[in-house]
Amino acid sequence: MTKRNEFWTLPLTKLNPEEWEALCDGCGKCCLNKLEYEDTGELAFTRVSCKLLDAQTCRCVDYNNRHSFVPECVRLSPASLKRVAYWMPKTCAYRLRYENKPLPDWHPLLTGDPESPHRAGESVRGWVISELAVPEDDWEDYIIEEGL
């Protein structure tokens, strides 16, 4: 399959698998561990990343086999977005398109440059710590106050 011109403007259900994957901007924000408070439903992002996130490239080190290592890793699809969009970062192309909003001007599909999210300060490059280095009981110490 090939990607169509401006495919990102189409409804998510109309994208082919290659187009679907290309929506990812490579920011790594979705790979941050989150805390959800049962009493309020409030969601807090942390600086603690999934053990499979490469903090330099902001990509999964074993994307195709990630569920073998992280069974709870979400399989994004147009159907699953109904359930998980609320915890996706506000700048995430999947969430934005689910909400019928345009991509941000720094998105690689618009710039043609995979480094554009990093230059725009929209990735986790340089400020995350692996969950392998932080006990889960301490994740609250790494909450990102301004949210994502």
Image (cartoon, rainbow, N blue to C red):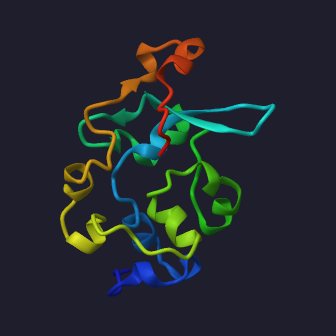
Q: How many marks?
A: 0
Residue 44, by quadrant, is top right
Residue located at (19% from left, 55% from top): 115
Q: Is residue 97 in view from this perspective?
A: yes
Q: Is residue 121 left or right of residue 47?
A: left
In the picture, the quarter occupied by the N terminus is: bottom left
In the rendered image, residue 67, in percent from the top left (x then y), is placed at: 55, 40
**Outermost residue toward the right in this view:** 39
Compared across the picture, whether 113 is left or right of 146 comes to: left
Residue found at x 38% / y 41%: 62
Using the image, determine if residue 22 lies above or below residue 92: below
Residue at (47% x, 77% y) in the render: 16
Q: Quick check: 68 left or right of 53?
A: right
Q: Nearer the viewer, residue 72 or 38?
A: 38
Residue 130: % across, % down: 40, 24
Task: Measuring from the top left, give residue 98's x and y in whole percent.
Answer: 58, 70
